[in-house]
Every structure is written in structure tokens, then in C-alpha cells.
Amino acid sequence: MSEPPEREEALLQRAASGDQRAFADLMEPWRQRLRTAIALRMDQRLGVRIDPSDVLQEAMVVASLELGKYAATRPMPFYDWLQKLAFQKLIDLQRRHIFADRRSILREERRSQWNDTTLHHLAKSLSGYILGPQSAALAAEREVQLLAALASLENAYQEILYMHYVENRSLTEAAESLEISPSTARTRHYRALRKLRELLRDQSS
């Protein structure tokens, strides 16, 4: 959970002036949320080389250097700014580890970009909306199917569902964070739900 606005503002001003303790306190409420966002967007091939926490750490270094400029201009909400820095750092690392060394990394074992906790959070948030009311036994069975369906979705679909149903962002807010148009966010959300229902229907047939 984020800090109350007045406390976050005070920490921001102190951190922008070079107070490292204030910077650590300012970042703390956002660390896990940012790490999850990074993990969702990370190319599966990169996961065999580095951990989302490594990306987060490098993004925090950039944030500490750029915080004064952010505090002076406030171009976007604070979390969205942090997420933008994190995603840019992720892109840089993916270029470095994947595209510069494509042959070796493609031979390494692939693993899911989503950890179990993230998948379960999203499945729990979506289960009532996607599956509707069911008996306890059937609900447990269908949740397993929902987890499998979510894991197989494209990353862009996973992202929009996570932002909307777990982070409780409107599609317009999600669009701003992802730097896409609201209409693209709405289309992506619609297609993600349609694909999920198709996958669940296939599993039940």
C-alpha cells in the first residue's frame, strides 16, 4: 500500500534533496508492486539469466539519480514514473542479454515469467467474474483450469488483466501506465477475456 499523499510528498522532497533514508522510505511501499510488474513483462528467456529483483535494483539507482528532475516537473503520477523507469531498464537488459547473445540464451531452459503468487492473485480476482458462482468442489477444479489458462496468455493480455483486476486500475489508467491509447487498452482487455473464456471452454470439452 502506498504512503498517505502528505507523507509521500514530504519524503519526496527530502529524497530529492539527497536524503538517502527518505529515498529508501519513499521506495519501500512500491517495491513489491514494481517487482511484480517487472516479472509480468519480463521475456521468459531473460528469466534464466536474471531475477526481477535485479531489474528493480537497477531501476532504483536510476530513480535516485532522476528524482530531483521528477520532483521539479511531475510529468506523471509517482508510481507510473517508477514503473516507466523499471520497464526501460528491463528493455535495456533484454537487449543486452537476449539480442546480443541470442544463440546461447535460446538454448537455455525456459521458465514461466509469472510466479505462483502472481497467478493466484489474478485467478482469485478473476474467478467470480469469469467463472461465476459454483459449488466449492467445482470452483476448486475450475480455478486450476483458470490458472493454466492465465499462464498461457500473451504477456500483453496478462498485463492488462493484472492492472485492471488486481491493481484495480481503470482501463484508462492502465492505458496511461502502459503508454497505449484507451481504445487499445479496451480492445486488449476484451480480447484477453475472450481468449480466457475460449481456453476454459476448450478445457471443459
Image: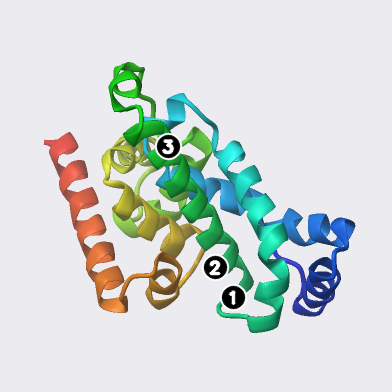
Quadrant of the rendering where the N terminus is positioned: bottom right
Q: Position of residue 75 (x, y in %)?
A: 56, 80
Compare residues 166 and 60 and report the one nearer the observer. 60
Q: Quadrant of residue 11?
A: bottom right
Separation of residues labelled 1 and 3 (CA atoms): 29 Å
Residue 77: image tag: 1
Residue of label 3 = 96
Amino acid on which the number 1 mark rests in the picture = Pro
Q: Which of marks 3 and 2 is nearer the N terminus?
A: 2
Whether pointer 3 and pointer 2 mark residues with C-beta atoms closer than 8 Å, the reply is no
Separation of residues labelled 3 and 2 (CA atoms): 24 Å
State whether residue 1 appears in this view. no
Residue 80: image tag: 2
Whether pointer 1 and pointer 2 mark residues with C-beta atoms closer than 8 Å, the reply is yes
- Residue at x-position 31% and y-position 35%: 148
Compare residues 82 and 61 and report the one nearer the observer. 61
Q: Is residue 123 left or right of residue 24?
A: left
Crowding near pointer 1: few (<14 within 10 Å), some, many (20+)? few
Residue 23 sits above or below residue 105 on the image = below
Q: In this view, does 164 lie to the left or right of 29?
A: left
- Residue at x-position 55% and y-position 32%: 51
Residue 10 sits above or below residue 154 on the image = below
- Residue at x-position 33% and y-position 19%: 104
Amino acid on which the number 2 mark rests in the picture = Asp
Quadrant of the rendering where the C terminus is positioned: top left
Residue sitting at the far bottom: 73
State whether residue 89 appears in this view. yes
Residue 112: image tag: none
Q: In which quarter of the image is residue 71?
A: bottom right
Q: Which of marks 1 and 3 is nearer the N terminus?
A: 1
- Residue at x-position 50% and y-position 67%: 168
Crowding near pointer 2: few (<14 within 10 Å), some, many (20+)? some
